[in-house]
Image (tube, coloured by chain):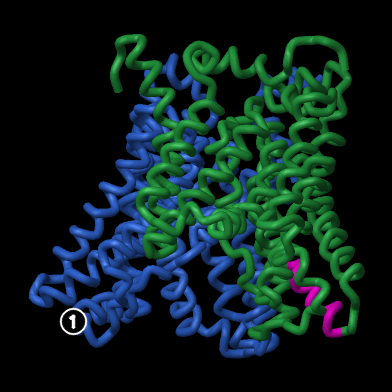
Chain colours: A green, B blue
Amino acid sequence: MTDAPHPRHIPDRLDKPLSSAIFSWEALLVVIAVLIFAVNSFASPYFLDPWSLSDLTFNFTEKGLIALAMALLIISGEIDLSVAAIVALASTMMGMAVQAGAGTPVLVLIGIVVGLGCGAFNGLLVTRLGLPSIVVTIGTMSLFRGIAFIILGDQAYKGYPESFAFFGQGYVWWVFSFELALFLVAALVYWFVLHRTSFGRRVFAIGNNPVACQFSGVRVDRIKFILFCLTGLMSGIASVLITSRLGSTRPSIAQGYELEAITMVVLGGVSILGGAGSILGVVLAAFIMGLVTFGLGLLNVPGIVMSIFIGLLLIIVIALPILWRRLREGRFA
Amino acid sequence: MKNLRKYREIWLLAAIAVLIGLISTRFPGFADLANLRQVFNDTSILMILALGQMVVILTRSIDLSMASNLCFTGMVVAMLNAAHPAIPIPILIVIALLVGLVLGAINGFLVWRLNIPSIVVTLGTLTIYRGATFVVSGGAWVNADQMSPDFINFQRAAFLGIPVLSWIAIAVIALFFVVMTRTAIGRSIYAIGVNPTASVYAGIDVGRTKFIVFCISGMIGGLAGYLWISRYVIASVEVANGYELNIIAACVIGGISIAGGIGSVGGAVLGALFLGIISNALPVINISPFWQMAISGSAIILAVVLNARGERRQGRIILRKAEAA
């Protein structure tokens, strides 16, 4: 790594001069998070309790772990819609292992290996055959979850060992859950990889112009393959956490997670067209989504109505800078 | 083999024929005309939806909110029918089309005026429209006994021995065929997908065309909303949950390129038919329905691989070939 300019600013400055001028995307997200936090603490007297704040984190840590890897994938110009199906398949395999009497270390290993394997399968299809990832992963989404359905039928696997419950229910220190600690550590690792290594810079470069990268000697396919493996790996880890937290496996586990993870990534300021974004933004977006769902939950708003707020938040936050720039240029929609 | 892609519909038709042949070896009655008519009727709604999605994908966009639109519109129409059974069905269908149009226009407006990528816009409206269904209904279901007999029986009525639902599908297919092959807007939609920049220079308003395309997919979603609810006679928030991906899958199997510009009405219809036959046949030939997802997933991956082969051979974008050389 040389002292070339910070990779993330190259696409940022080119795309939206506004973000460097008055506020950055991350600052906007912080403001939104603080606002929602304030509203929540006024809306419910139970919100500011440390334990309830700790519960809040369970709303986003599992999807957030997937979103970290998804962010890199989307920055490189690809997407993975099969992540929730990978979670389901990995969880099903863990369930089978439990029936065969496997212990906790074996279960965790199975979750991670199955996730990694599914990600590698996606990566191979996309890079070896040169297929569009959005279509490939729609196919593997049905395939992976289909296999889970074939194995499970209409049953549920239960009977996970007691020591296994730590991953989804355990606490590292006082109110800090293992899930939150893992999410924060993973966020640091992903931040370092994306913003401080040449690998990360290549991910941005591929998202901006894969052809130019190829000619510059970047092994585009190999990096994309690694990114698909990482997304699969994170889905496998998330699967261990969810299975441990719920203590059971059903074929419908983690339904809809792919869209929530992508929402976190986009809300976090990653361009869906590739080439721009930051890990800090994704982490903030994950917190914001956790805050919204938890706050609305305290007010007894049903889950389906919460999704309206998440959807509105996504569109409004994306539209804001565009409207803002038009206002400054004296041009209106 | 050079013209593999050109004759995609023939290949798909052959694949469907082989599929029906294979199923017939296990269940002899499957290839009977009466049963095939039934399969077509069962697949009608998916075919209509796939056509709406096709025009969006052709312009290099995507509409993830179609199934939520279907759910919302279906709920609105069902509640109207439950509250005022006197409203005639044709008027309810017009209302469904209008509600769908409004939802589609919201997507289209955001894509057109704010330049937000369609995948982001419709990811947002996907959750908003489904949430709005809950708000409108208060979480309550509309059951069969609350719907008027007309509401339920309209699409089941036979006309010339074929149910009205099938006739609606045939009419929609014919309409799309004419629009996509014989009108300026149809040509513009293809042109935008092949090369948006060149389309601008050719005098096509790309933004406005995308807006129109989302209005079309919205109206189709609305129409499918009425058809779905009156067919399965229950309206709830859960209706067609996750179905947006089945619709896109039908398009992909039908050879519609997700990169835009390539695809045909016949392809979309056959793609939907292919998925429809799989889901229809599995229970009949005693394969557990749990296999359905895995089989259609494999079919999608296979179709994509074949698509990519065809597209590569053609060298669709001339410049890209030069770049790679």
Between A326 and A62, which is closer to the camera in this rendering? A62
The local crowd at label 1, few if under 14, some if 14 to 19, many if 20 or more residues have their Cα within 10 Å, is: some
Relative to A173, residue A154 above or below: below
Q: Tell me the residue at 74%/67% (across/down).
A: A89
Q: Is residue B163 left or right of residue A48?
A: left
Q: Is residue B248 left or right of residue A210?
A: left
Q: Which image quadrant is residue A226 in?
A: top right
Locate residue A82, reporting x and y percent.
Answer: 68, 55
Chain on which label 1 sits:
B
Locate residue B59, reporting x and y percent.
Answer: 48, 36
Relative to A92, residue B322 above or below: above
Relative to A156, residue B76 above or below: above
Q: Which residues are magenta?
A: A89-99
Tell me the residue that label 1 is attached to. B148
Which quadrant would the C terminus of chain B be assigned to in this image? Answer: top right
Q: Main secondary structure of the magenta part?
A: helix
The kind of secondary structure element at disc 1 is loop
Q: Tell me the residue at 62%/90% (across/down).
A: B28
Residue B48 in sight in this render: no
Locate residue B146, reporting x and y percent.
Answer: 22, 83
- Amino acid type at circle 1 is Ser
Q: Is residue A23 left or right of residue B142?
A: right
Q: Tell me the residue at 26%/47% (across/down).
A: B102
Between A118 and A135, which is closer to the camera in this rendering? A118
Q: Which image quadrant is residue A147 in?
A: bottom right
Q: Which image quadrant is residue B66 in?
A: bottom left
Q: Tell me the residue at 33%/35% (across/down).
A: B109
Residue A196 in sight in this render: yes
